[in-house]
Image (cartoon, rainbow, N blue to C red):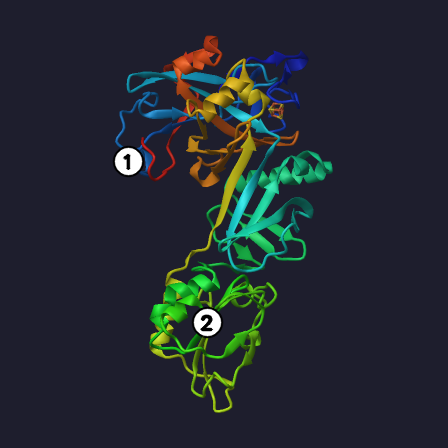
Amino acid sequence: MNEVAPALESDGIVRCDACPVLCRIRPGKLGACDRYANIDGNLVRTDPVVVLQRTDKAVPFLNAEWSGNPLQPAEVFVTGIGAGTTYPDYKPAPFIVSCEVEGIDMVTVVTEGIFSYCGAKVKIDTDRYIGPEQAAVRAKGEQVGHVTTAEYGSQMLALGGVRHLTGGSKKEGTVTCDTLLSLCNGEAVELAVDGGSSVLVKASGPPVIDGTEETRMRVGCGSATVGIFAQQWRPHVDEVIVVDDHITGVLTEHQAGRCLDMRPSGIRVRGRRSTPGRYFQVAQPGSGWGGTNIANPLDIIQKIDPAVAWPGLRLLLVSTTGDHSMWLELDENLKPVEKEMPEAVRNTVERIGENCEPALSTVLFMGGAGGSLRAGVTENPVHLTRSVKQALARVTCGGAPVYVWPGGGITFMVDVTQMPAGAFGYVPTPALVAPIEFTLRLSDYAALGGHMDHVRPLASLRDNTETRPMPYMPGRRA
Ligand code: SF4
């Protein structure tokens, strides 16, 4: 626990000035965010500063080869978790820690930033229709975000943001903050989409849509599936239709079928023909075959041309995950009749399933480094922004690497699963609290107008720290 200079009032009450709420905390009590407490008249940050142990690979902490010194510069990284927050903005960051790494004097500036401008981008691996783009996404009845543009095999949500945190009712702001906090700390959250589904989302867990757990992320769109499997289908089928809400593929018409000299089948599907063998809008979106509302796949067949098709034509209908499939043959009247699927064809359907990755929900926290974050690093914040853009200063979030957006400001995204557990907090303004660290050479820090008077050696953190293994990130050097 870190003691912070208290503003002692009468009756032993301590005034916390770590955020604009300015809680008056009675002896033995916590502030509104549970992050600060009044212990014996001292304002104390209730969690220890988390120091990460650098490792090459994921190992249980106690099994790792380690010198036993939690504050060896080459072995540890000081995070903003538990560091505390400074307010108002001009105060230096809570910890500005120097250490020598491979002969170079480095400094890491750590803080727990208060993010009023923040949100979460949620990727849900599913073909199922969860609701129209732009539809409101609600938690506990309050709008906390919206459905945004779908990606390849995934539905996407944009949650939070300053408008939901500050621009609506107090309840909307509170629920939005609560939702973001839970999601970013890896908890499951139930969301409801207006005009769509209810979705249970948990970072790195399978999404549950309207009570059904999603297991497979599709192998590709209908057209891609045709392209991938055309050669394997060629000896066993006369036609394949891969049903997909976005791009339904028809093998013999598709370029893949043509290149394999497949005979046209004369089977025409509904929808708008984009290019040969690729059809848009064959049905409405839904929870049926390939993310459509189709329960009977024969519904998407518009006609069978008697001048082209022939009795005995072998037809495979399949979805992009292989979850749905049907084997048919045309009878003497060119009517499709369901038959038992030959083993060779069954194997190709199973291979579609085999090529599907596990369906997951992914949560990226996205925030903008504001006043206290930047002024806490330097008296001249634009120099920090420039040094980040010039890659002189490395930004991390609880030790995890971030993606910093090009353009102005320091707007970044981080995969919350790469951060230590419980890294996020909140303040009731409402805003999310997230750790952030800026690491750069000590000489560069001095050059950008850093708070050099507040630089302290790593060893000074000996007390009030908790060492954890660094989250495993493939490709990252220790
Ligand atoms: S909400 Fe937390 S950080 Fe803000 S003043 Fe209260 S105790 Fe301090």
Q: Quadrant of residue 418?
A: top left
Check the picture and name the quadrant holding the C terminus: top left
* In front: label 1 or label 2: 2
- Kindly state the secondary structure of the residue where label 1 is placed: helix
* Furthest residue in direction right, as rendered: 169
According to the image, label 2 marks what residue?
253
Q: Is residue 426 visible?
A: yes
Residue 91 is situated, as x and y percent measured from the top left of the image, at: 56, 14
CB of mark 1 within 8 Å of CB of mark 2? no
Image coords of residue 299 (percent x, y): 57, 76
Q: Is residue 96 above or below residue 188?
A: above
Residue at 40% across, 70% down: 257
Residue 314 percent location from the top left of the image: 42, 81
In this view, 324 is above or below 303: above
Q: Is mark 1 within 8 Å of ligand 1?
A: no
Task: Give neighbour class at mark 1: few <14, some 14-19, many 20+ (Cα, 10 Å).
Answer: few
The dot on residue 63 is 1
- Residue shown at 35%/29% (left/top)? 53
Residue 105 lies in what quarter of the image? top left
Q: Nearer the viewer, residue 107 or 54?
A: 107
